[in-house]
Image (cartoon, coloured by chain):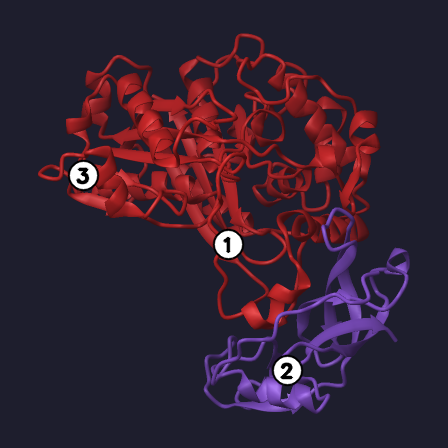
Amino acid sequence: MSEAKKYNAPVTNPETAPFWEAAKAGKFMIKRCTTCGEAHYFPRAICPFCFSDKTVWEESSGEATVYTFSLMRKSPTGPYAIAYVTLKEGPSLQTNIVDCDLETVKIGQKVKVVWKPTDGAPLPFFTPA
Amino acid sequence: MTIKGKAYIAGIYEHPTRHAPDKSTAQLHAEVAKGAIEDAGLTKDDIDGYFCAGDAPGGLWPMVDYLGLNTKKLRHVDSTETGGCSYLIHLGHAAEAIAAGKCSVALVTLAGKPRTGPMPPRASGAEADFELAYGATTHNAYGMCAMRHMHDYGTTSEQLAWIKVAASHHAQYNPHAMLKEVVTVEDVLNSPMISEPLHRMDCCVVTDGGGAMIVTTPEIAKSLKKPLVRLIGHGEAAKGPRGGKDLDLTYSAGVWSGPRAFEEAGVTPKDIKYASIYDSFTITVLMQLEDLGFCKKGEGGKFVADGNLISGVGKLPFNTDGGGLCSNHPVNRGGMTKILEAVRQLRGEAHPKVQVKNCDLAIAHGTGGLLGVRHAASTCILERA
């Protein structure tokens, strides 16, 4: 595992700035549509399901299960595990599984959010729960 | 309105190079354009439609200018960019334009130099801040699809390896193929792991080069000397995580583009004599075969095993030029070469060792972008007229 991996700071924009502000306080936010009730990720102003503009921020539990992953062995920065995890609240998202023995990552494994610093807002990653 | 039978592929050319340190990207576009125009028996001044994608240096108008297309005649252009399947979509759009009378001789070009020149960076969308840091690459994005397919359906690395084995059996007869050596299932399994569960031999080649085609009206095609090949069905579609709801990486947008093309053509997968299937990775082929209806979802592993994709051996000869896995994957975009080999098969111009007997109906299908992230798909059904 590469301990000192450097990540670029998110660029952010008016639509997603509240996500990154909350991230600085360690809160992992998703968006939920108050019209159709569906949660989604990454956050949009307009619901990608029913196209309503009545979407609100909601703090996620940060608890998820691994939907799939691939251990990338050929990488100039060292091996890493790219994955999709499915949040307890419903949406699935792309991430890396970090801070663990990468050989033990499994589909269905319980994971939780963990933050990695950048020069700006921190980035969400997931690690075994 | 349908495009069925409204457009013919009258000229094709695949650049023989796989390594072009001594050429420019624009030059490769010009060389493949020249090759396709000459194959059709036409001249540059006959071109009144031009199609290119993200690999064209500077985009559409700089290419039109560089190629010296006759701008007094040129009346239809299209720079639809959907990664590797752009050229399959161009074929469908060219047929639409021809059917609508917007052009009569369309040129489509693809070329580039990923081995010997800089590649344009992959464009990213609104997801950038939420995904780029995680290092999705072609290898691991397709690795994630394969991993989940294995989990859900019991697909094995041995089954995936059969796809590469079949491609290698075909590539041995292609003098231009980058990899001509016949390989075994064991060879694939013993090749280095790149991104689990995909080995090096599960991955396509990276090549400089390109290809081009001429799409034209039935009348013009019939006035030329080449065997007649026409488009009778076309479909296109896109798929992505869409907010993360009901994520399922075991199928592609081919589940939508395929049926659209088959319906327009009025044929079924059972009727197909030859299949060009995008093979960026072995898992790409397996998922596409399921999505297009050549077998049931989850049964792709069984379908591709034991040489079933080898011409003269199995039930569905595929990628008889050696495909992207062994022959050519110019600019990391495999859609054009899929069309070119399908046309060779329908013309009876494939290598005698891999030529499918009485090949009168073929499919060319591809995806563009990353199957495990967001992608487009396009399906073309081609018929010998």
Q: Residue B103 in the image: x percent, y percent?
A: 18, 38
State the SS at label 3.
loop
Q: Amino acid at mark 1?
A: Arg
Q: How many residues crowd mark 1 within 10 Å: few (<14), some (14–19), many (20+)?
A: few
Q: Which mark is residue B103?
A: 3
Tell me the amino acid under the disc marked 3. Cys
Residue at horizontal 54 percent and vertical 28 percent from the top: B328
Q: Chain of mark 1?
A: B
Q: In the rendered structure, which disc, 1 or 3, sits on the residue that comes first in sequence? A: 3
- Can you tell which chain is drawn red? B
Which chain is rendered purple in the image? A
**Front label number (2 vs 1):** 2
Check the residue under mark 2 and report the chain it is in. A
Q: Front-most of A48 and B281?
A: B281
Tag nearer the camera, 3 or 2: 2
For disc 3, the chain is B
Q: How much space separates mark 1 and mark 3, taking CA atoms?
A: 31 Å
User: Which residue occupies 52% across, 26% down?
Assistant: B19
**Label 3 CA crowd tier, 10 Å (few <14, some 14–19, many 20+):** many
Disc 2 target residue: A121
- In the displayed image of the protein, which residue is found farthest to the top? B352
Residue A16 in picture, x, y percent from top left? 53, 82
Residue B98 visible to an observer of this rendering: no
Tell me the element at label 2: loop
Which one is in front in this view, the residue at disc 1 or the one at disc 3? Answer: 1
Q: Residue visible at 58% across and 31% down?
A: B324
The C terminus of chain A lies in which quarter of the figure? bottom right
Residue B320 found in image quarter: top right
**In the image, residue A95 lies at what x, y percent?**
70, 67
Please give the residue where the numbered disc 1 appears in the rendered image.
B122
